């Protein structure tokens, strides 16, 4: 009897050790970097709104803006090409640690087999990016659902990490080996702004679209998502972010989804339809990052409208000023700084760049050099004058001037052709110099100035010391911008 107990204890110890090692190896081999990992760093029961969906949701929903405007907390639990079965298990995973009052689901996952992404491409992308939640029974159920629901039914063993990622052992890093002890934090809460613009003609929903057939597992899991929300006291809101449809049958598909919402008392914000798109002022010429996703302008409009809807229909708490949510204030400040930096990086016109760079949190270096005689249009000379720099430089054949601005205040100016300045403030340190033949802004031993004949601008973040932009406006090309 004693011997039997000893054997059972040893077997149990072996099984526990094996399970622990399996979980560790699974996490070690997987690709890192998903913002889903940051969800686990959120305090228990601190998230008011869970957003679900694929890259459409990732590009469209900005939880930190709603925290800024209303004090609502939220997180985007997305994965690329997220079908409805993945949305369901991501919600199940979220409900382990959070008790959201509202679940916002982007319905693009209902378009499986009916849109610009083929089922094979959707399945392949989902295979690579769906199993991002932690190893658990929920993740095992997701793997079985992927195997059963996808158009191409693959063996569930396809989704075992040590099979799927077995070749990654060749490129493992310290981050991979230490993953159980590292915390992932996502200040943007799963939002991934797209800072490009792809212009398209306005798109209008057709009155009588071709008929679409909803893929049965999509409807099955939509019903399961609704049931799971009901079981956990969360209200469900469906959305459709704008994109360029592949055929007018997609309008029929989303109208079927709308009928389901009416039958199930679920709110529906379909921005593909004309009236909602007009309500938010969506511009297909400026608000898309590509044919399938909104850019940061479009996201701002959708987020604002979703925020208005949440404020009008749900009594969500305002956490601003609550000490328990101090991390959200820090995350908001970080996101606002990142957004401001990106807005500055997007400026390709001298006046707009200098206007943005003269904000309080930037240090700006302007080095002007070369044969500039007769090269500058009045818009350039006026811009230089308006920003406290000499327009007379553009009558010189051997010009050289160096300016340093802190928060828009000019702290150094030299147009003698031999200007040099060392600057030190907290984490920021650099040396700048300019002659007619060369301009240099040196940080950590590297010249980060573009050093072109014309106007060279380098912008630093005063707090972090990071270079935000280095750009030149070329005298020989009408002062066109250059960052090459």
Image (cartoon, rainbow, N blue to C red):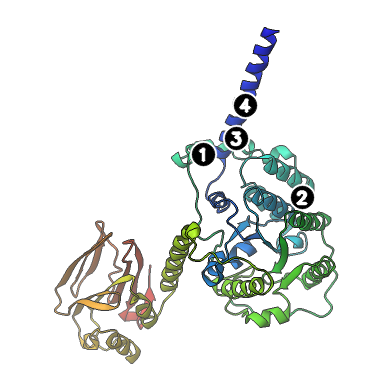
Asked if residue 270 lies left or right of residue 194, the reply is right
Q: Is label 2 in a helix, a strand or a loop?
A: loop
- Mark 1 — residue? 180
Q: Tell me which numbered mark, 2 or 4, is placed earlier along the sequence.
A: 4
Q: Tell me which numbered mark, 4 or 3, is placed earlier along the sequence.
A: 4
Q: Which quadrant would the N terminus be assigned to in this image? A: top right
Q: Nearer the viewer, residue 111 or 8?
A: 8
Mark 3 or 2: in front is 3
Q: CA distance from mark 4 to mark 3?
A: 11 Å
- Mark 2 — residue? 150
**Residue 142 screen position, x and y as percent:** 71, 45
Q: Tell me which numbered mark, 3 or 2, is placed earlier along the sequence.
A: 3
Q: Is label 4 in a helix, a strand or a loop?
A: helix
Mark 2 or 4: in front is 4
Q: Nearer the viewer, residue 178 or 98?
A: 98
- Mark 3 — residue? 23
- Mark 4 — residue? 16
Q: CA distance from mark 1 to mark 4?
A: 17 Å
Q: Which quadrant would the C terminus be assigned to in this image? A: bottom left
Q: Is label 1 in a helix, a strand or a loop?
A: helix
**Residue 117 screen position, x and y as percent:** 70, 61
Q: Quadrant of residue 134?
A: top right
Mark 4 or 3: in front is 4
Q: Nearer the viewer, residue 152 or 41?
A: 41
């Amino acid at each position: 009897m004693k011997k039997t107990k000893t054997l059972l204890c040893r077997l149990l110890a072996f099984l526990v050790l094996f399970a622990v090692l399996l979980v560790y190896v699974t996490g070690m081999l997987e690709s890192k970097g998903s913002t889903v990992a940051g969800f686990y760093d959120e305090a228990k029961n601190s998230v008011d709104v869970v957003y679900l969906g694929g890259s459409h949701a990732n590009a469209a929903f900005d939880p930190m803006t709603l925290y800024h405007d209303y004090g609502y907390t939220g997180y985007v639990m997305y994965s690329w090409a997220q079908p409805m079965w993945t949305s369901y298990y991501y919600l199940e995973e979220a409900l382990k640690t959070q008790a959201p009052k509202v679940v916002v689901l982007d319905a693009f996952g209902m378009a499986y087999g009916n849109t610009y992404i083929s089922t094979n491409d959707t399945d392949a992308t989902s295979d690579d990016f769906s199993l991002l939640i932690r190893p658990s029974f929920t993740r095992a159920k997701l793997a079985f659902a992927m195997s059963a629901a996808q158009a191409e039914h693959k063996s569930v063993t396809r989704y075992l990490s040590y099979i799927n990622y077995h070749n990654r052992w060749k490129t493992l890093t310290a981050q991979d080996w230490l993953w159980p002890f590292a915390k992932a934090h996502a200040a943007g809460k799963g939002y991934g702004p797209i800072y490009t613009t792809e212009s398209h003609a306005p798109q209008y929903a057709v009155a009588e679209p071709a008929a679409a057939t909803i893929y049965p597992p999509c409807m099955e899991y939509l019903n399961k998502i609704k049931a799971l929300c009901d079981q956990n006291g969360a209200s469900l809101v469906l959305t459709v972010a704008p994109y360029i449809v592949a055929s007018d049958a997609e309008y029929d598909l989303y109208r079927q989804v709308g009928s389901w919402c009416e039958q199930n008392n679920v709110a529906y914000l379909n921005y593909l339809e004309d009236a909602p798109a007009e309500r938010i002022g969506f511009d297909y010429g400026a608000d898309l990052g590509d044919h399938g996703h909104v850019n940061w302008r479009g996201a701002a409009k959708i987020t604002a409208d979703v925020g208005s809807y949440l404020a009008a229909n749900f009594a969500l708490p305002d956490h601003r000023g609550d000490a328990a949510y101090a991390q959200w204030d820090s995350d908001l400040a970080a996101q606002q700084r990142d957004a401001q930096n990106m807005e500055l990086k997007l400026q390709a016109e001298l006046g707009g760049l200098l206007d943005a760079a003269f904000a309080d949190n930037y240090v700006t270096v302007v080095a002007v050099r070369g044969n500039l005689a007769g090269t500058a249009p009045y818009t350039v000379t006026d811009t230089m004058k308006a920003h406290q720099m000499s327009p007379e430089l553009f009558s010189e054949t051997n010009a050289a001037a160096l300016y340093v601005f802190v928060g828009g205040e000019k702290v150094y100016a030299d147009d003698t052709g031999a200007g040099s300045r060392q600057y030190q403030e907290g984490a920021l340190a650099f040396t700048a110099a300019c002659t007619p033949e060369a301009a240099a802004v040196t940080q950590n031993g590297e010249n980060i100035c573009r050093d072109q004949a014309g106007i060279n601008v380098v912008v630093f973040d005063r707090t972090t010391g990071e270079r935000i932009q280095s750009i030149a406006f070329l005298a020989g090309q009408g002062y066109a911008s250059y960052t090459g």
